[in-house]
């Protein structure tokens, strides 16, 4: 049962459960969930965090408590809890603040900033950034978590899966937290600038660590962490509105509208046809 959800998701759900336990301790409620308890919890938490986040907290609480209290999901769906949360969203809701997307100008700036004699870590950061942008990758699919407890080597791409052509390169992403089919993904990048820097990085990587199985490695042979990537990204783009998710530029509704397919159907299709996704999102100009 512990492997049913991703380790990072399990940690987040655990934090949500801890917040409920602390709430019950402070106010003298039993830990066994009831509609009244969850309703009071929603109101309490909405005075400290965004109501949308409280909605996510409830999902985590249900996941953690369900083995012990099987009725918890029905309680979560009850009219009292649902309407309490809806009312809090109406009264205390705030506008969603999204990070700015990276543009092609940002990528040109990153390429220009590469020193004439770059270090191996310089050569690692740039193709990671370009690959993430062109392939719509999450930062967690290019780096390993800062927290050692939730690191999972099964998710790390292997260098042996890499294939470089005249105009593109591709590799295999074995797993990620949103992969509901547990089949992995082919990552295909057609951008010539990304291909050029990827070739340079791969040559440096194979020279330094020819026996290391992983694709993205630092000069010391370790996988880059999220913190290290963000440190380099912030040094290049000081704007705090640019973050790791800025690489995933096109919103999902644009992908859906482009062929009028149901979003889940389209995602399943492009999983097996990465060239189609590349052609739609990054047409040659």
Image (cartoon, rainbow, N blue to C red):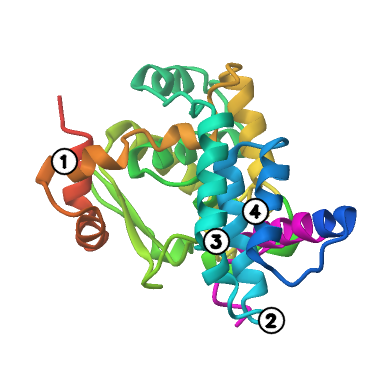
Q: Is residue 124 visible to us here?
A: no
Q: CA distance from mark 2 to mark 1?
A: 42 Å
In the rendered view, does 73 fall on the left or right side of 188?
right
Pointer 4 residue: 39
| Residue depth check, mark 2 versus mark 1: number of the one nearer the observer | 2
Q: Position of residue 159 (x, y in %)?
A: 47, 61
Which badge, 4 or 2, comes first in the chain's sequence?
Answer: 4
Q: Which quadrant would the C terminus be assigned to in this image?
A: top left
Can you tell which of label 1 and label 4 is closer to the viewer? Answer: 4
Q: Secondary structure at mark 1?
A: helix
Q: Secondary structure at mark 2?
A: loop
Tag 3 secondary structure: loop
Distance from disc 4 to disc 3, alpha carbons, whole Å, reads 47 Å
Residue of label 3? 214
Q: Which residue is mark 2?
A: 68
* Nearest to the observer: residue 66 or residue 125: 66
- Per the rendering, the mark at residue 257 is 1
- Residue ID at (69%, 68%): 33
**Residue at disc 4, secondary structure:** helix
> Where residue 181 sits in the image (x, y, percent)?
36, 72
Front label number (4 vs 3): 4
Which label was assigned to residue 102? none
> Which is more N-terminal, label 3 or label 2?
2
**Nearer to us: label 4 or label 2:** 4
**Residue 101, quarter of picture:** top left
Q: Quadrant of the N terminus?
A: bottom right
Q: Nearer the viewer, mark 1 or mark 3?
A: 1
Which is nearer the N-term, disc 1 or disc 3? 3
Q: Outermost residue, left direction? A: 259
């Amino acid at each position: 049962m512990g492997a049913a959800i991703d380790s990072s998701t399990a940690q987040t759900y655990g934090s949500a459960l801890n917040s409920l336990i602390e709430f019950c301790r402070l106010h003298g409620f039993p830990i066994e969930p009831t509609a009244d308890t969850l309703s009071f919890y929603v109101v309490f938490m909405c005075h400290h965090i965004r109501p949308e986040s409280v909605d996510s907290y409830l999902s985590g609480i249900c996941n953690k408590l369900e083995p012990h209290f099987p009725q918890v999901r029905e309680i979560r769906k009850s009219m009292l809890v649902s309407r309490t949360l809806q009312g809090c969203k109406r009264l205390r809701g705030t506008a969603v603040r999204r990070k700015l997307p990276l543009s092609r100008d940002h990528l040109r700036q990153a390429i220009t900033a590469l020193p004439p004699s770059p270090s191996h870590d310089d050569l690692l950061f740039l193709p990671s950034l370009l690959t993430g942008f062109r392939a719509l990758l999450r930062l967690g699919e290019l780096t390993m978590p800062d927290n050692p407890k939730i690191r999972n080597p099964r998710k790390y791409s292997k260098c042996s899966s890499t294939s470089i052509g005249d105009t593109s390169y591709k590799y295999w992403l074995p797993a990620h937290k949103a992969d509901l089919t547990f089949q992995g993904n082919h990552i295909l990048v057609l951008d010539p600038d990304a291909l050029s820097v990827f070739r340079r990085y791969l040559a440096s990587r194979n020279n330094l660590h020819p026996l290391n199985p992983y694709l993205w490695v630092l000069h010391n042979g370790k996988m880059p962490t999220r913190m290290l990537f963000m440190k380099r990204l912030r040094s290049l783009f000081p704007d705090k509105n640019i973050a790791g998710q800025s690489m995933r530029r096109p919103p999902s509704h644009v992908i859906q509208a482009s062929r009028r397919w149901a979003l889940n159907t389209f995602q399943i299709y492009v999983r097996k046809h990465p060239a189609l996704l590349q052609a739609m999102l990054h047409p040659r100009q």
